[in-house]
Image (tube, rainbow, N blue to C red):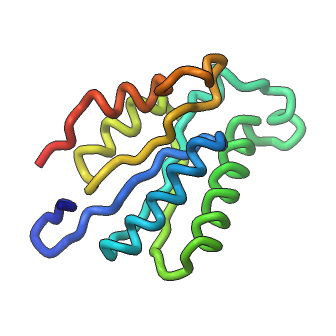
Amino acid sequence: MWKAVGTMVRPLVVGVDGSDASFLALDWAVDEADRHALPLRLVYASRWERYEDAALGLSLKRPAGEVHADNIVGAAVERASLRNTDVNVSTQVLGDDPESVLLRESDHVSAVIVGSRGRGAFTGLLLGSVGLAVAGRPIAP
């Protein structure tokens, strides 16, 4: 059962990182949002200033990671709208660790959806580090 606070319905949140696994999670989340008449929020989080190359950002007057994040979120929004135009989709891009962001989000949403594998070097693992961190913490009532 999805959570509601009073008359406010809590959205589904899906973590997107541009990986195939996150886009498959997005597809599932769009279907669930439609099935349960819930809003859907797409969240991208990264410490891009720490991990991403700054050279592109200097030429664009924006951090390269921010440009990258906007591209990923834009692709995710397009994919969600192609899958179902009736689902209310919003986005959030944050310059923080994905695990921290999604764990904070879990206090205010119906569910947090993540892919089974991420963009990291160990993409062959059964469950990515972000998925493992989020799955290991229950959502507060």
Res 65 → quadrant:
top right
Nearest the camera: 50 or 20? 20
- Residue drawn where x is 40% and y is 53% of the image: 13
Residue placed furthest toward the right: 59
Residue 136, percent from left and from top:
28, 27
Give left or right: position of 133 versus 137. Answer: right
Q: Position of residue 69 (x, y in %)?
A: 66, 44
- Rendered view: 83 above or below 119: below
The residue positioned 47% from the left and 58% from the top of the image is 28
- Residue 88 lies, with reference to residue 95, above or below; the image says below
Tally of numbered discs: 0
Task: Farthest residue to the bottom: give it.
Answer: 86
Tell me: residue 131, above or below residue 39.
Answer: above
- Residue plotted at (66% across, 21% down): 51
Residue 56: percent from left, percent from top: 85, 34
From the top left corner, tell me how far across and down residue 62 is, in percent: 75, 41
Q: Quadrant of the N terminus?
A: bottom left
Left or right: 134 with respect to 31? left
Where residue 76 sits, quadrant-wise, is bottom right
Residue drawn at (26%, 63%) of the image: 10
